Amino acid sequence: MHTNRSFARRLFLVINFIVLASISFLCLMPIIHILAISFSSGAAASAGKVTLWPVEFTTAAYDNVFGKPEYLRAFWVSIQRVFLGTAVSMLLTIITAYPLSKDSRQFRLRTFYAWFFVFTILFSGGLIPTYLTVKNLGMLDTIWALVLPGAVAVFNVILLLNFYRNLPKELEESSRIDGASHFTTLWKIYVPLSLPALATTGLFTMVGHWNSWFDGMIYMNHPENYPLQTFLQTVIIKMDFRFIKPENAELMVKLSDRTSRAAQIFVAAFPILIVYPFLQRFFIKGIVMGSVKE
């Protein structure tokens, strides 16, 4: 009987490994395909010869990408947006989740404000009122138009307040006995203990800012203010060779719209591919909101 269970266990592990490896490969195939196209010649990419390995290897597409002032400018706008937007959003999320994590005896209007935030998830103000608000505040064509309208992510607030509610109450009581204020309790006790939850919500915020393209299109009147994803959306629709100098005829021969787009898409995805593995270990801890170590 023990031998049968052991064989069944090994068989399960083998099948589980094969299934998970197949799923992982299917998830990686599009990225590998884009990378292969970006390093292939324009003729091979246009002929559909590229699958998962470059054909007629060349770096012409990347030479074109990093020689585009518009692309580099859009990349810099996205970097500013991610750092500034994540910092502002995390600050507002922390100071909003803390009071909402208290019970009604400590914060009498807690239930009212909690439902007020939940209401914004179910019903939004709409695109036109939001645009008019941004315009009347003078934020069009500024980085603040990309940061402030979605600075308070209610979903992240709910995740964080649930984490706070599951922290031992004795921690706050002891800090209050020692004379600590709510501000000190928040930044000296709650924030250090909630790093897994903050890493999770911070990753959500970073990815959201990096991938967002529609708000850049409606809030930016000039293409030089586009974030990277908005710029890529225009590139996918229309190929642009304006920044290739006439003397670089060899580069134009090696390029095609497919290779240039593939290179720009991969460069845009690369920062998130680099950051995510470092925050993945916090991800599992952050999902289980409320685990208390003895």
Image (cartoon, grey):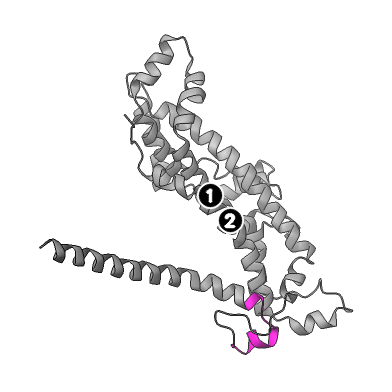
Q: Residue furthest front?
A: 3
Which residues lie in the magenta part? 37-49
Which is more toward the observer, 99 or 287? 287
Q: Residue at x 89, y 79 (%)?
A: 247
Which label is found at residue 152?
none
Give the quarter of the image for residue 282: top left
Within 10 Å of disc 2 (Cα), the crowding (few <14, some 14-19, many 20+) is: few
Q: Residue at x 75, y 60 (%)?
A: 72
- x%, y% of residue 257? 68, 79
Label 2 near label 1: C-beta < 8 Å?
yes
Do we see residue 16 in this rendering? yes
Q: Residue at x 73, y 74 (%)?
A: 59
The amino acid type found where label 1 is placed reads Phe
Asked if the magenta segment contains residue 12, the reply would be no
- x%, y% of residue 221? 71, 57
Q: Residue at x 42, y 44 (%)?
A: 155
Q: Is residue 293 left or right of residue 196?
A: left
Q: Residue furthest left?
A: 1
Which is more toward the observer, 201 or 223? 201
Position above or below: 40 against 129: below
Residue under label 1, please give it.
278
Residue under label 2, please give it.
274
Check the picture and name the quadrant holding the C terminus.
top left
Check the picture and name the quadrant holding the N terminus.
bottom left
